[in-house]
Image (cartoon, rainbow, N blue to C red):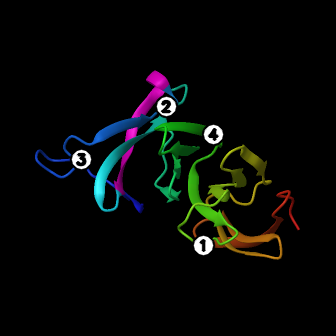
């Protein structure tokens, strides 16, 4: 079985997704608003559409980000959207959501940050922090503030997370190092 996931624009009548099961990934209830759609294919055939929701804050503003991304394996899809990390289980069509408290930016497999395959652990960056997420357990650690306007991971070497954070936009990037096991700066 080979799964593929792509972002999906609004379907048109008669397109290949007509009649495909749609599941809402909305842990926010009435405070959620539809943001993006993901099309999941199995061996090239459309099988499922995930509608991703973002939440509205106390004043009604949507907590949305220009960034949204995903990683997958044969049974799970890990998704970042808005200010949440979601894990969707293909077999049960259920999901778990973890609030991160900041706009998401990137998701990286651990230990190979360049892989598009979901492993047991991932690093998720927000505009200010790095999180180590365990797919089954959730948040293992949250770093101290690494930036004010974006965090990227450049590599993992010898149990050390190397990255850059933007402190003075635009272009004011500064390097940092974190212990992979604890998230403590090195």
Q: What is the magenta segment's predominant secondary structure? A: strand
Which residue bears the numbered disc 3?
10
Quarter holding the N terminus is bottom left
- First reached walking from the N terminus: tag 1 or tag 3: 3
Which residue bears the numbered disc 1?
171
Q: Is residue 124 above or below residue 87?
A: below
Q: Which residue is at the front of the view, 10 or 24?
A: 24
Q: Which residue is at the front of the view, 90 or 101?
A: 90
How far, Cα to Cα, is label 3 from label 2?
Answer: 22 Å
Question: How many numbered circles are shown?
Answer: 4
Q: Residues within 10 Å of mark 3 (few under 14, many from 20)?
A: few
Label 1: state its secondary structure.
loop
- First reached walking from the N terminus: tag 4 or tag 3: 3
How far, Cα to Cα, is label 1 from label 2?
Answer: 30 Å
Which residue bears the numbered disc 2?
56
Q: Viewer-nearest of labels 3 and 2?
A: 3
Q: Is residue 102 left or right of residue 161?
A: left
Q: Residues within 10 Å of mark 1 (few under 14, many from 20)?
A: few
How far, Cα to Cα, is label 1 from label 4?
Answer: 30 Å
Find the magenta span and give its range: 29-41
- First reached walking from the N terminus: tag 3 or tag 2: 3
- First reached walking from the N terminus: tag 4 or tag 2: 2
How far, Cα to Cα, is label 4 from label 2?
Answer: 16 Å
């Amino acid at each position: 079985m080979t799964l593929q996931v792509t972002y999906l624009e609004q379907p048109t009548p008669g397109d290949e997704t007509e009649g495909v099961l749609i599941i809402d990934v909305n842990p926010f209830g009435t405070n959620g608003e539809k943001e993006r759609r993901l099309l999941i294919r199995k061996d090239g055939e459309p099988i499922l559409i995930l509608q991703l929701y973002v939440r509205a804050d106390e004043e009604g503003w949507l907590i949305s980000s220009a960034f949204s991304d995903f990683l997958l394996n044969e049974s799970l899809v890990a998704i970042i959207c808005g200010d949440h990390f979601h894990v969707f289980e293909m077999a049960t069509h259920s999901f778990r959501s973890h609030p991160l408290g900041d706009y998401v930016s990137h998701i990286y497999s651990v230990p190979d940050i360049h892989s598009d395959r979901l492993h047991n652990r991932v690093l998720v960056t927000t505009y200010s922090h790095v999180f180590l997420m365990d797919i089954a357990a959730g948040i293992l650690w949250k770093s101290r503030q690494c930036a004010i306007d974006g965090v990227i991971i450049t590599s993992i070497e010898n149990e050390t997370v190397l990255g850059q954070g933007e402190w003075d936009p635009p272009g004011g990037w500064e390097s940092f190092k974190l212990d992979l096991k604890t998230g403590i700066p090195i």
